[in-house]
Amino acid sequence: MRKLVLAAVSIAALTGLAACQNPAEKEADARADAVEAQADVTATQLENQADAAPTAAQADALNAQADAVEKKADEKADAIKAEAGNADGGMTTSNTPPKS
């Protein structure tokens, strides 16, 4: 059920953004969404294993691993989107990271 809700929300978000993005940004968003969706599946599997773990320590370790998977995927997705945002030097995109 969670996966279906995530997929529906992702599709709605992509549809809303499609009109104001260039092709590179659209492709990057699709790749980033795929990275996040795969991480969600992996994290859910780890959380399910945690629920069935025989000890609290094992459950905590599995939940921590699930959190790490999600965090890493978010960082990777952000990097994918930022790279696409810089494809034109940041002249026309709204997701260009600030200069440091």
Image (cartoon, grey):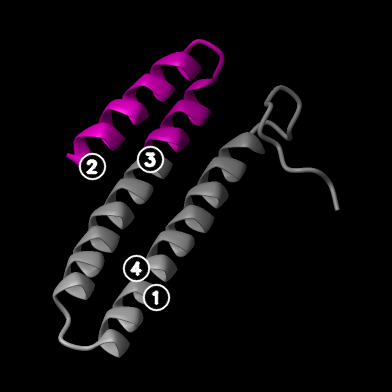
Callout 4 crowding tier (Cα within 10 Å): few <14, some 14–19, many ≥20? many
Report which residue position mark 3 lands on.
Answer: 33
Task: Quote the CA–CA distance across marks 3 and 2.
Answer: 15 Å
Q: Amino acid at mark 1?
A: Ala
Report which residue position mark 4 lands on.
Answer: 66
Query: Would you say residue 21 sits in the magenta stretch?
Result: yes
Ranked by sequence position, the earlier of labels 3 and 4 is 3
Give coordinates of residue 58: x percent, y percent. Answer: 26, 86
Classify mark 3: helix, strand or loop. helix
Q: Is residue 85 above or below residue 48?
A: above
- Left or right of 52 in this view: 38: right
- Left or right of 12 in this view: 23: right
Ranked by sequence position, the earlier of labels 3 and 2 is 2
Q: Give the magenta range.
A: 1-30
Task: Tell me where residue 21 sits by quadrant.
Answer: top right
Report which residue position mark 1 lands on.
Answer: 64
Report which residue position mark 2 lands on.
Answer: 2
Ranked by sequence position, the earlier of labels 4 and 2 is 2
